[in-house]
Image (spheres, rainbow, N blue to C red):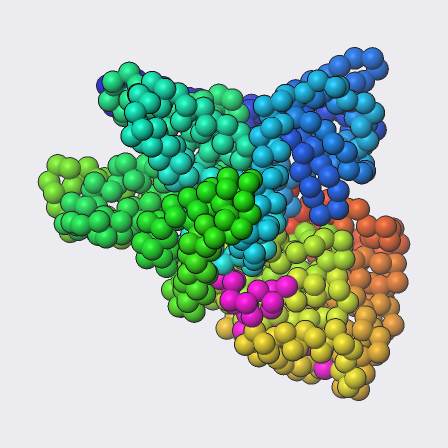
Amino acid sequence: MGRRPVCILCLFLMALLWLADWMGVPMMRGNPLPADMREVLEKETEVSAVGEVERCADTEFSQSVYLKKVSVIYKSKKVSIGNLRVFLKGEQKLPAGSLVLARGTLEEVKEPRNPGEFNSKQYYACKHIYYFMKKGEVIRNSKGYSRWGQFLLDMQRKFSDIFDKTAGENAPVFRAIVLGDKSELEAETKMRYQMAGIIHILAISGLHISVLGTGLYNLLMRIGIGIWPSGLLSLSVILSYGIMTGESVSTIRAVTMFLVSVGAKITGRIYDMPTALSLAAILILLESPAYFLDGGFWLSFAAVVGIGAVVPVFCGVFKVNGKMGKALISSLAVQVVTLPVMLWFYGEVSAIGIFLNLIVLPTVGVVLGSGVAAAILGLVWKAGAAVIVMPGRGLLWLYEGLCILGEKLPFCTWVGGQPKHWQILTYYIVLAAAAVIWKCRSRSKWVLLFLVTGIMVLAWRPETDLRITCLDIGQGDAIALETPSGQTFLIDGGSSNKKEICRYQILPYLKNRGISYIEAVFISHTDNDHISGIQEFLDYQAAGVSSVKMGSLVLPKWENPPDAWKKLAESARRAGVKVLTAKSGDVFYGKNIELRVLAPGKEARGENVNEEGMVLEMVYGSFKGIFTGDIGIETEEKLLEEKVLEDVSYLKVGHHGSGYSTGEAFLQTILPEFAVISVSETNTYGHPSGETMQRLQKAGAKVYCTKDRGAVTAEVSRSGTVSIKSYLEKRK
């Protein structure tokens, strides 16, 4: 290490960044703008901003433009705010490099509101974007622009159109692999590749740069151009390719290392991978320290460390010879080094990917090469491009088949959950100790023992208290019940103002908690804000693209259920999920809990799904909690008449805190200690009602709203003691 000063400098920089973050310096997370400026922007949301166009992108509903070097104009003053993404009212041609004056509503990038949820705020912080401009309108833009930058964007669009015309249903995958554009990829395709452990081929990475850059350099050398022209030309092409494909962190890392490699060849020096890797990390972190907390950064660099440092050790341990054996060892080494990173950011890791990559990694160069060749040839001859892309299409068909086959295996994906910091640190210490032992003594058994020990430390999950988590999914309900014995139940899962909540909120939460199986999902009623995410869940399970499985679906027993009820039941059967119905008097037993059904009544028809919805009471030792769906005062009075209500510790407030629910008589009977309201911060219904809040306070309940606190978790000890934790408060 002493001979590698760049590596030492890299470690010093990382330690400095960690120390700054620990001390609360806003270098890597949060909004680095001065507090007084943030206050101004919160008050003056309708602002004008000027910046340079980096690129335009189409969203589902509008066109957006990325601006760099942005200044907000406030009281005739310009205040720099970094970069900005502007969502335009209508489409407009804005060339790259042109200056734009736009006006619109400024909105700070939102932070995640649930455990496991994708951190958009951190993602955009890496790009120096801390605000979005909504309803943007371009007031004027300059005539001057970057001709080279716009040429690259125009070529990307042309190549994209060529794939549409020549690659058929594989066009979105080719756009992702060749152009770095994943906007058109279907959710099921992404999830399928992720479960199979081959999603890395959809990101521009060192593999792409190696295939294209090294291939071009070798080609130029063979035709006799010479070292310097070959190196400079291939480097220029790769730099332009990196810009065209979006300059992701893996691309920047790969391009930097390729630059060092070519520089070494040109100057006759020896290429040192650790030095090149450290230089790439330094450049990335100096430009944007926020990458220090980015999953893509750590996965990209950890994979290279696995290949460079762990592969030689494993080859010695397993006494591997031959290309196939070395390929398997390389795949295993990358998996071993990136394991804690995958679990920390995604909560799961593909086990089958170690073997699938034996087929994918040696052949993906053919997919990339045929895609690049088709894109270039398609500029002049579409029919020829359709032919030359066929080998790549055939391999993509093979990958799809392997993914589907892998999904059927019980050990396809391990949902391990997010480990603690001490577990990650211990794992890497044990892994390093194993490498040192091998280097000093060549003891294979000790290396394997250390490796297994490290994985066991990473996988260890202590028995916890009962957890009731009300997720923040906007205007809707989604509640997870986790028992000390490891069973998990869901109550509802839907939203009326957020799409794909299963993919973006429910599944990430379950994976973050290490949950791979749901015993049962209880549906209070069939309004969309209670079932949209469950419908999505069932569709994913039927397609075989979810690593989390559902065992049973429990629907309210109605004599004449509506179409939404029937559709949900049919989707469950198609997904292999058992369908049950429940009415008052039914009891569902877990290992530690009882779920008693208080409603609907035995003669419920399903005509008024709110009032005839399912009401559940959960019993765990001396603890009782009640989940009321969207029932109103009418149903509450019926329950009072039936005398089935009793004192409870926990109340999931009915109908998102509506004034027509959670009546005084109901509250005075159950006298909840804690009450949780699931409600959107942007709802237009006035939820929660001021009257309801007053009634809850009068009953002595401590009230928690998801719109203010994010996901709200109640932890219940065996003695019945309840502690409430809010996700947003925990993050602060």
- The structure residue drawn at horizontal position 41% and vertical position 61%, both measured from the top left corner, is 398
Viewer-nearest residue: 8 or 368: 368
Q: Is residue 556 magenta?
A: yes
The answer to whether any part of residue 320 appears in the image is yes
Residue 407, given in percent of the width and then of the height, sits at 44, 65
The quadrant of the rendering that contains the N terminus is: top left
Magenta span: 536-557
Location of residue 41 by image quarter: top right
- The structure residue drawn at horizontal position 72% and vertical position 82%, both measured from the top left corner, is 557
The quadrant of the rendering that contains the C terminus is: top right
| Vertical placement of residue 543 versus 323, above or below | below
Viewer-nearest residue: 173 or 5: 173
- The structure residue drawn at horizontal position 81% and vertical position 18%, both measured from the top left corner, is 74
Viewer-nearest residue: 408 or 687: 408
| Vertical placement of residue 379 versus 694, above or below | above
Location of residue 391 by image quarter: bottom left
Identify the residue at the far top of this view: 77
Residue 421, given in percent of the width and then of the height, sits at 42, 41
